Image (cartoon, rainbow, N blue to C red):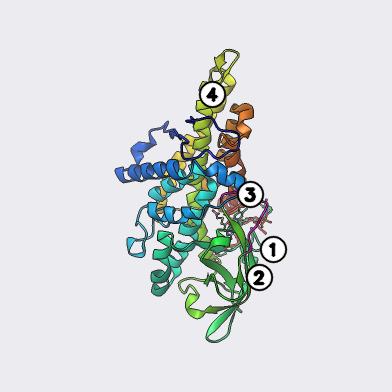
Amino acid sequence: MSLEAPIQNGQARGKHFQDDFESPDFYQIDDLLNEEHKLIRAALRDFVKLEITPYIEDWAERNHFPMEMVRKFGEVGAFGPTIPEQYGGSGLDYISYGLIMQEIERGDSGMRSTASVQGSLVMYPIYAFGSEEQKQKYLPKLASGEFLGCFGLTEPNHGSNPSGMETHILDKGDHYLLNGAKMWISNAPKADIAVVWAKNEQGRIHGVIVERGMDGFTTPETHGKWSLRASCTGELVFADVKIPKENVLPGKSGLGAPMMCLDKARYGIAWGAIGAAMDCFDSAKRYAMERIQFDKPIGSFQLVQKKLAEMLTEITKAQLLNWKLGKMMDEGKATTPQISMAKRNSVEVALNIAREARQIHGGMGITGEYPMMRHMMNLESVVTYEGTHDIHLLILGADITGIPAFK
Ligand code: TGC
Ligand code: FAD
């Protein structure tokens, strides 16, 4: 990346920051994309260069969630791109969705979190399991960014094992009473609505839509994160919250319902994390050609070339995996283990590339003048949420052997 004017370490880059990012396409994967895909990617890349990269280091340093981005994401079509147009979405395919996530996470994983939670974890369950009234009421506002949503599955005592959840609803005749707490919830402190998973008296999991302002519903912010600092995270606390019966998602119950949402979001992360990897690779490649040591660009040394060659190899392999997975998503054939493989692979590749790229930048690599440390810290959340790295390995292990090793 080149800068129009030098900046002090950690200072906001500001609107004059020039982001020259170019994505690697070593295996001509663009040949696999149609014109619409390329246009969408170009639009999102321009959007990220204009609206995210000039400001992200400042937001991250100040631990600031830029609320104005919610409307901007709505305007650029980043919320629920696969949702049909009649509900405010764009009716796009999964390759388009993947490319949108890739471009946004190239800017920042926390920004991608905001968009993928809204699309895959809030709009998707309302679209797939909601009543027609719920779809009409919430989806257009979520698509436009008038509403921000969040998804409450994880609890203080139940992270990798959501089936143990304690949050519950009691049938009170004309309404339900919701009690319990969710933790580590992206968007929670600012969300207008929350899609919350809770057990009924029979222990069956249901999705309920909780609206900000309902008595007994609070969303305390989680402080002290060294990761995803431009994304807001919080708790959802329910103390005798009265839930109108029409706020329960009628179309599906059981753990399978939230798991279907996670399939969509994990797919988006598979593309997104490679966006972060591409940003680190691009920065490392430029720096290797500009930085002179021993009277030569450091890119002329074999050990630096090895790093760059390995980064490009892993990015290319992941691009092909993601593209094929996207095609299977479009055909409705992608399985949860296939999605796990891609999510797990992309995040590992991205973390390794962030670390290697940081090394190529030497001391400068630890500053906010370059994106690697921010990506690296962000990716420590990405490797944990939506199923930890090891849970995805166990999902693959169960698929290979037929023996689930979770319990
Ligand atoms: P298991 O026995 O495997 O399944 C229970 C029931 O669910 C069904 N099911 C699915 N149905 C449809 N699609 C899927 N993908 C499904 N996966 C499971 C399954 O058929 C069964 O149905 P039934 O009718 O037989 O009862 O469940 P388990 O309790 O053994 O758990 C398996 C395990 C560990 C893999 C699963 O719980 C898991 O994936 N845990 C990880 C939890 C996780 O990923 N949490 C994510 C929280 S959200 C988040 O992190 C958002 S971050 C967002 C951001 O900021 O980007
Ligand atoms: P634990 O489940 O306690 O796991 C701790 C360790 O034990 C991990 O290494 C794990 O792999 C390992 N482990 C657990 N079980 C097994 C096993 N059976 N075999 C081997 N190893 C095991 N959740 C939401 O619902 N909505 C959100 O929007 C959301 N956003 C998040 C945002 C951030 C920034 C973060 C950090 C998390 C978010 N989460 C969200 C929660 C996330 O999904 C959980 O953190 C994740 O599922 C892991 O749960 P846990 O943190 O309780 O870890």
Ligand 2 lies under 8 Å from the Cβ of mark 3:
yes
For label 3, the crowd category at 10 Å Cα-Cα, with few meaning under 14, some 14 to 19 and many 20 or more, is some
Which residue is under mark 1? 157
- Looking at marks 4 and 2 on the same chain, the residue that comes earlier in the sequence is marked by 2
Tell me how far mark 1 sits from mark 2, CA to CA: 8 Å
Task: State yes or no: discs 1 and 2 in contact (Cβ < 8 Å).
Answer: yes
Disc 4 marks which amino acid?
Ala
Q: Position of residue 327 (x, y in %)?
A: 39, 48
Which residue is under mark 2? 166
For image coordinates 56% across by 39% down, the residue present is: 349
Report if residue 229 lies within the magenta region.
yes
- Looking at marks 1 and 2 on the same chain, the residue that comes earlier in the sequence is marked by 1
Which residue is under mark 3? 390
For label 4, the crowd category at 10 Å Cα-Cα, with few meaning under 14, some 14 to 19 and many 20 or more, is many
Checking the image for residue 288, the label placed there is 4
Disc 1 marks which amino acid?
Asn
Q: Viewer-proximal residue, 382 or 5?
A: 5
Disc 2 marks which amino acid?
Glu
